[in-house]
Amino acid sequence: NDGGDNNNGDRDSGDDEKMPTPNEMFVATLAALTAVQTALENKQQQQQQNDDPATMMQEQSSPSMNDTASELENTVIPLLEILRRILPYVANYGNNRGALLAHQLGTVSRSLRLFVAMAYALPAGTPDGKHGRKKRLNNNDGNNHTGAASGANALLRQILKTTTTLLLVPPSSVSEKDVAKLLHGTIIPMFHDARPKVRKAAWGCATEIVIAASASHSASPSIASSMEHDPVPEHVVAAHSQHKKRVADFLWEYCQAVLTSKRKSGGGGAMGKESSTKLMHVLRFLA
C-alpha cells in the first residue's frame, strides 16, 4: 500500500495523516450538513416569532430570504455533492459491510427531506418559458426573487442526484419503510414540480433507478468495487439486486396510483385539475 485508502474505509498505518478516509469524510460532511440545517431552522423559528403577521408578506422579500438561499446554494449544494461522491465508498461491502451508512441512513434521509422542505419554502419563481422570462425581465419593483428561486432550483436538482445515489448503493439492511419515506420526501414530489428543469431532473433520476433495476445481473457500484478485492457472498449481491427492483417497484406503484386516482376522480374542479396535472406528468415520464 502506497498510502492510499484501503477498501474498508479505515486508515492504514502508513497513510498520510492529512488524508481523510471515506468514513471520516462522510462523518464530517454529515455533521456539516446537520449544523447548517440546525442553524437555518433556528433562524426561521426566530423570524416567525419576531414577525408581525401584518408584515409577513414584506418579510418574504427581505434580505434574510436571500441570505437563506445563498446559504443553501453556496454551502449545502457543495456538501451534498461531496456526500454523493463518497456514498459508494461508505456503502462498500468491504467497508465493514456498510455498517456506518446503515447506522446513519436515517440521519441522511431526514436531512435530504428537510432540505427539500427548505427549498420549497423559498420562492419558486416563474416556470421556464418566454412568458416567465418576460415577467422576470419586467420585475423591477425591488422584490425580485430570481436569486432565491435559482438557489432553490439548483438545490432541488442536487438533492435528486444525491438521493438517487443513496437509493442505489444502500446497505443491505435498509427497510422498505425507509425507502418509501425517502422516495416520497424527495423524488416523487418533484415529479410534479411547476419548474420544468426540476420536474425533468426528477424523471431522469427515476429513469436511472428503473434502468439500474432492470440490469439485475449486474451488481451495484459498492458491490462491484468490493469484488475487485474480496469475494462478496452471493446472497449479498442478490439482496442489492432485489433492493433496486424494490425501489423501481415503488415508482411503478406510484404511477399506477396516479392513473387509478384519475379514473376515480373523473370530474373537474380543483381536485380534478390537480389529478389531471399529475396524470400528465406521469404519462410524460412513462413515455
Image (cartoon, grey):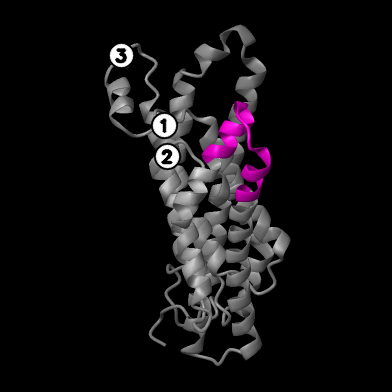
Q: Residue furthest top?
A: 54
Residue 275: quadrant of the picture: top right
Q: Which one is nearer the viewer's eye here, 149 or 84?
A: 149
Q: Which one is nearer the viewer's eye here, 200 or 182?
A: 200
Residue behind mark 2: 153
Give SS at disc 1: helix
By secondary structure, the bulk of the magenta-drawn segment is best described as helix
Q: Is residue 267 magenta?
A: yes
Magenta residue span? 258-277
Q: CA distance from mark 2 to mark 3?
A: 21 Å
**In the rendered structure, which amino acid carries the disc numbered 3?**
Asn
Give SS at disc 3: loop
Give SS at disc 2: helix
Pick the quarter of the image with the C terminus: bottom left
Looking at the picture, does residue 124 appear above or below residue 207? above
Residue drawn at (58%, 89%) of the image:
232
Q: CA distance from mark 3 to mark 1?
A: 16 Å
Answer whether labels 2 and 3 touch (C-beta < 8 Å).
no
First in sequence: mark 2 vs mark 3: 3
> For residue 140, which numbered disc appears in the image?
3
Pick the quarter of the image with the N terminus: bottom left
Residue behind mark 1: 149
Answer whether labels 1 and 2 touch (C-beta < 8 Å).
yes
> Taking 182 as reference, is 205 left or right?
left
> For residue 121, which numbered disc appears in the image?
none
> Taking 197 as reference, is 280 left or right?
right
Mark 1 closeness class: few <14, some 14–19, many ≥20 residues within 10 Å: many
Q: Is residue 36 magenta?
A: no
